[in-house]
Image (tube, grey):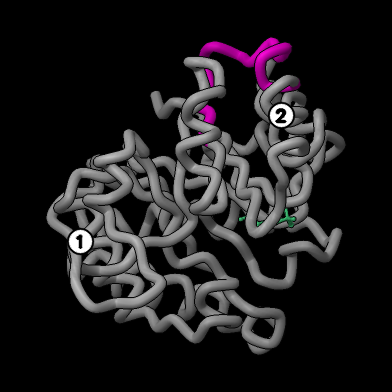
């Protein structure tokens, strides 16, 4: 069985004082022990959060570059994260793709390097509204997944996050049926293009306006293995989302 996975993506939010409040509700929980919980933290707070989170919560960066070191002003490498005890990174988030112009190719190179360096990766994919409306959802998510699949040897340390761009920060959550349909198609694609074992073991999580109110219904779908949560991960609601299958 695939272990349920809930990630909180704080994006560019949080002060030390706000972070202390978040860590307080994570400590109070209680968090379902059957769920893997990871928080995605702005780079400057990674070591601070690592030093104060409870042991059942892991810490993730929100980006890394594709080489170990060198003349890349402003970037952080997987080796630097591991040197600081940070085990996870979020790569390919739609904001990296659409605000910062990251391509499928660059994201795939980053995923490849992060895995080779020893990080675990939350790899994000998802279609834009106009792509969905043009009937191109499958084409887009297959292309994004293929770029990664072509570069990596193993999916063991990957969680795939399906985050339709039209659902991110909009309050327009995908319905459980809409999300399930894409997750199931991704498994079919993985079965045919990677291998059947990966299609059954890879965790595919949903992101996009997940709340304490809609998490339970989404979590009932057989191919939804958890969530990547933005706005609600900054609030005590996050605990209810972690516990969606309780
Ligand atoms: P929201 O939950 O705020 O819609 O953000 C989703 C997201 O982008 C998580 O990575």
Report x, y in % for residue 63: 43, 61
Relative depth, front residue between 210 and 195: 210
Crowd around label 2: few <14 · some 14–19 · many ≥20 (10 Å): some
| Left or right: 206 as drawn, with respect to 167 | left
Residue under label 2: 20
Choose top left, top right, bottom left or bottom right for residue 106.
bottom left
Report the residue at 67% width, 21% height from top. Answer: 26
Report the residue at 31% width, 67% height from top. Answer: 65
Q: Name the quadrant of the C terminus.
A: top right
The region drawn magenta spans: 25-38
**In the rendered image of this protein, does residue 85 appear above or below residue 129?**
above
Choose top left, top right, bottom left or bottom right for residue 212.
top right
Select label 2 or label 1 by which is in front.
2
**In the rendered image of this protein, does residue 36 appear above or below residue 156?**
above
| Left or right: 195 as drawn, with respect to 135 | left
Report the residue at 80% width, 42% height from top. Answer: 211
Q: Secondary structure at mark 1?
A: helix
**In the rendered image of this protein, does residue 16 appear above or below residue 137?**
above
Q: Is residue 188 magenta?
A: no
| Left or right: 35 as drawn, with respect to 128 | left
Report x, y in % for residue 203: 42, 41
**In the rendered image of this protein, does residue 31 appear above or below residue 159?**
above
Q: Is residue 30 magenta?
A: yes
Q: Secondary structure at mark 2?
A: helix
Residue under label 1: 113
Where ligand 1 lies, by quadrant? bottom right
> How far, Cα to Cα, is label 2 from label 1?
32 Å
CB at disc 2 and ligand 1 closer than 8 Å: no
| Left or right: 168 as drawn, with respect to 1 | right
Report x, y in % for residue 194: 21, 58
Dot 2 or dot 1: first in sequence order is 2
Q: Name the quadrant of the N terminus.
A: top left
């Amino acid at each position: 069985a695939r272990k349920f996975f809930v990630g909180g993506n704080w994006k560019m939010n949080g002060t030390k004082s706000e972070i202390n409040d978040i860590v307080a509700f994570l400590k109070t929980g209680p968090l379902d022990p059957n769920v893997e919980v990871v928080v995605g933290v702005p780079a400057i707070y990674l070591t601070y959060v690592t030093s104060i989170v409870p042991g059942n919560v892991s810490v993730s960066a929100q980006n890394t570059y594709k080489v170990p070191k060198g003349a890349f002003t402003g970037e952080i490498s997987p080796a630097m994260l591991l040197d600081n005890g940070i085990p996870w990174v979020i790569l390919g988030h739609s904001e990296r793709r659409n605000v910062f112009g990251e391509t499928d190719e660059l994201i795939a190179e980053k995923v490849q390097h992060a895995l080779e360096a020893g990080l675990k990766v939350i790899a994000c994919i998802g279609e834009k509204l106009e792509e969905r409306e043009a009937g191109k959802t499958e084409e887009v998510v297959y292309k994004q997944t293929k770029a990664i699949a072509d570069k990596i040897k193993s999916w063991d340390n990957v969680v795939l996050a399906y985050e339709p761009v039209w659902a991110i920060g909009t309050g327009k959550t995908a319905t459980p049926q809409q999300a399930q349909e894409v997750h199931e198609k991704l498994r079919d694609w993985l079965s045919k293009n990677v291998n059947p074992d990966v299609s059954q073991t890879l965790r595919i999580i949903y992101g996009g306006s997940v709340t304490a109110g809609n998490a339970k219904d989404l979590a009932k779908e057989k191919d939804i293995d958890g969530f990547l949560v933005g706005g609600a991960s900054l609030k005590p609601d996050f605990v209810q989302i972690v516990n969606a299958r309780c």
